[in-house]
Amino acid sequence: MLKRLVTALVTLVLAAGALVATGAPASAAENVWCDPESSRCYLTISAPSDPAPNPDSNGWTAGAPACYSRIDPNYVNDYPNEDVVTYEASGVRYFYVKIGCGDGMRYWSNSRQCFVSMVQGEWPARPGSYSQEAGYYVCAPFIDQGATITSYFWSETIPPGLKVLTPGSAAEQLISTFGLRGIDIGMAPEVNPEWGHRRGYVGVPIWLWVNNPEPLTWGPYTETATLGGQTITATAKATSVRWQMGDGASTTCGNTGTPYNTGYGMTTSPTCGYKYTTTSSRTPGDRFTVTATTSWTVTWTSLAGPGGTINLTTDSSTDLEVNELQTVIVP
């Protein structure tokens, strides 16, 4: 905020945190520049600039505390004195007027001297030098910008003051809300109601499958949402299950497996199975912990054009007792 002091017909305009004189003032005392024609004096202060991006926990970046647009000297008198600041560089005096900084979807850049906003609608092809996290922005002039014209640019970071998300960041936030979970484990042997757990035997085939596959346990699962100005559609699909059998070995199946029924007898699963070579007697509780880790591929697209993939996993587990069959010889 500017404060005016009138002393001996001289107006001293004080400003804080807006502009700086980079050249020597014509008449100065304690960093004050005075205009002999208008009898107006100005305190030299910091030049208009934008702070370095410093995202908070939501990824937003703070803009300049005050925003100033450069104006034609001929129009200085059209604005209230308390809204005008100035600085001199190389013998040239520049005038700025204080303006609103924006609403988060667009924000005035003191450095660029324009309103910066993320481009709405479809974006052009992203240059190879930028990642899928880069955003596409427009720099639109305001008031009298001299040589400043509307321009477009890519940036890996969100310009200060904008509360928007790049397509990649919006996709990550959307996918983080998915309620994907581990599969419902299907296994032969099944849980014996009398024992309360599964019991298998060394050398006897174990059948493994995804029991009752659903969108949240196997996919496809799709959601669409608008976050930070981006409309994203993401689809998750499971690609494989890695079965860690608890004995140090594992097997990976790129399918849901085949559910077992008694008609199969002692045969091996045609799609996903395992055979133990040791018992679980040396493990705590005489149980192997079987863990099924599902690998997911989530593909996403945006109305702006960019898209990508995100890989993630989910887990589920069950206990299995493995004994050894004894051969009894009878006469």
Image (tube, rainbow, N blue to C red):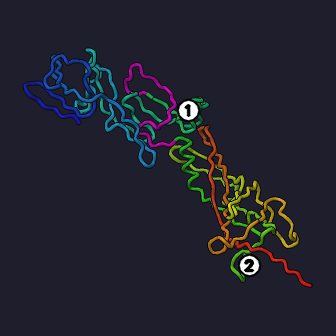
Magenta segment: 141-165
63 left or right of 296 in image: left
Rendered-image quadrant of the C terminus? bottom right
Q: Which of 230 and 221 is in front in this view?
A: 221
Q: Where is residue 250 in the image (x, y as percent from the top left)?
A: 71, 58
- Which residue lies under the disc numbered 2? 192
> Is 104 above or below relative to 192?
above
Name the outermost residue toward the bottom: 331
Query: Foreground mark, 1 or 2?
Result: 2
Q: Does the stretch in magenta take in 34?
A: no
Q: What element carries label 2?
A: loop
Q: Magenta part mainly helix, strand or loop? A: loop
Q: Where is residue 302 in the image (x, y as percent from the top left)?
A: 61, 42
Name the outermost residue toward the top: 91
- Which residue lies under the disc numbered 1? 130
Cα distance in 3D space between marks 1 and 2: 57 Å
> Is 78 above or below relative to 201?
above
Q: Residue at x 43, y 49 (%)?
A: 57
In which quarter of the view is residue 124 placed? top right
Q: Which residue is drawn at 67% across and 57% down?
A: 294
Q: Which of 222 and 219 is in front in this view?
A: 219
Bin the neighbour count of mark 1 within 10 Å (Cα to Cα): few under 14, some 14-19, many 20 and up. few
Q: What residue type is labelled 1?
A: Tyr
Q: What residue type is labelled 2?
A: Asn
In which quarter of the view is residue 72 placed? top left
Name the outermost residue toward the right: 331
213 left or right of 304 in image: right
> Is 49 above or below relative to 285?
above
Q: Does the stretch in magenta take in 150?
A: yes
Q: Which of 259 and 147 is in front in this view?
A: 259
